[in-house]
Image: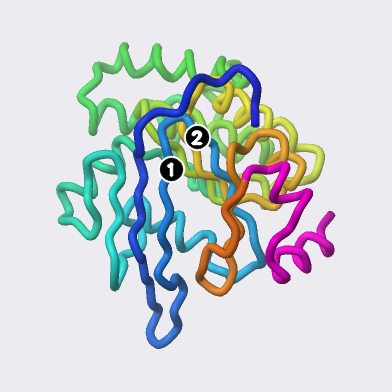
Amino acid sequence: MTEGRGKRGQTVVRCVEVTKRFGSFEALRKVSVEVRAGEVVCIIGPSGGGKSTFLRTLNGLESIEEGEIHVLDVRLPAGKREIERLRREVGMVFQSFNLFLHMSVRANLTLAPTTALGLSKAEANERAKRLLTRVGIEEQIDKYPGQLSGGQQQRVAIARALAMEPKIMLFDEPTSSLDPEMVNEVLDVIRGLAESGMTMLVVTHEMGFAREVADRVLFITDGQILVDAPPAEFFGRPTDERQAAFLSKIL
């Protein structure tokens, strides 16, 4: 757990027996979990086990067949208007950046705050500059994504999500598309968010990062959360055979 973060607040994410199916395939099976304000929860497990699907249900990118999800004051499943409101408060960063390639970095960061939040161009521009300074690439503001390295693009994606001033951040394997030398620059940004007290759920294969930054680690496989434990316990004292087998392959 990162030193210096304050006390945990009220529950901001609550999943109750959530089930998600793709046809006859059950991607999530009766998943129940809670996350409190200020927590950093790292989600690990084998590919295809349901990690990304779980994350995507939290802001309505994936619908659910059974159960219910409470995020802040929105209950899912919900209508379009409620989901749009939720997405203004829950930022998400994908492994593939998802930037608008035909728009400058400045335009990528100012589009949503002006259209969805009603900020003036001047206000949105000041916010963009402040956030790019925060992620360490303020000098790139007038470049286009194609002119940036993968690590820089991912930092732009993080800044773009932060431009909406979200209460929760979701990261779906944010370093998996990066060359090894670019991984740390993105992880450093996420570490800084953890230090600031941002509530985060992070799907990651970076075990050292999870051990260092997480308050809790969830092990998801076969559509279920098999283990939910603090990092020291999770990595030091495995309690599930599948968890132990997974860790033996990657540590």
Residue at 33% x, 60% y is: 16
Using the image, determine if residue 27 lies above or below residue 90. Answer: below
Question: Magenta part mainly helix, strand or loop?
Answer: helix
Q: Is residue 4 left or right of residue 180?
A: left
According to the picture, the residue beneath numbered tag 2 turns out to be: 39
SS at mark 2? loop
Amino acid residing under circle 2: Glu
Residue 112 visible, this orientation: yes
* Residue positioned 58% across, 32% down in the render: 155
Question: Residue 64: percent from the left, percent from the top?
Answer: 31, 67
Asked if the residues shown at circle 1 and circle 2 are in contact, with their CB atoms under 8 angstroms apart, the answer is yes
Q: Is residue 120 above or below residue 235?
A: above
Q: The residue under label 1 is which amino acid type? A: Val
Residue 165, quarter of picture = top left
Q: Is residue 247 magenta?
A: yes
Q: Is residue 11 left or right of residue 233?
A: left
Q: Is residue 106 left or right of residue 185?
A: left
Instruction: Check disc 1: other Cα within 10 Å, few if <14, some if 14-19, many if 20+.
Output: many
Where 196 sits versus 56, above or below?
above
**Secondary element at tag 1:** strand
Query: What are the residue bounds of the magenta stretch?
Result: 230-251
Disc marking residue 35: 1
Counting from the top left corner in percent of width and height, residue 84 is at 23, 45
Q: Position of residue 193 (x, y in %)?
A: 55, 26
For residue 249, the mark is: none
Q: Quadrant of residue 242?
A: bottom right
Tell me if residue 101 can be seen.
Answer: no
Colour logic: rainbow
In the rendered image, the vertical position of residue 39 relative to residue 204, given as above or below: above
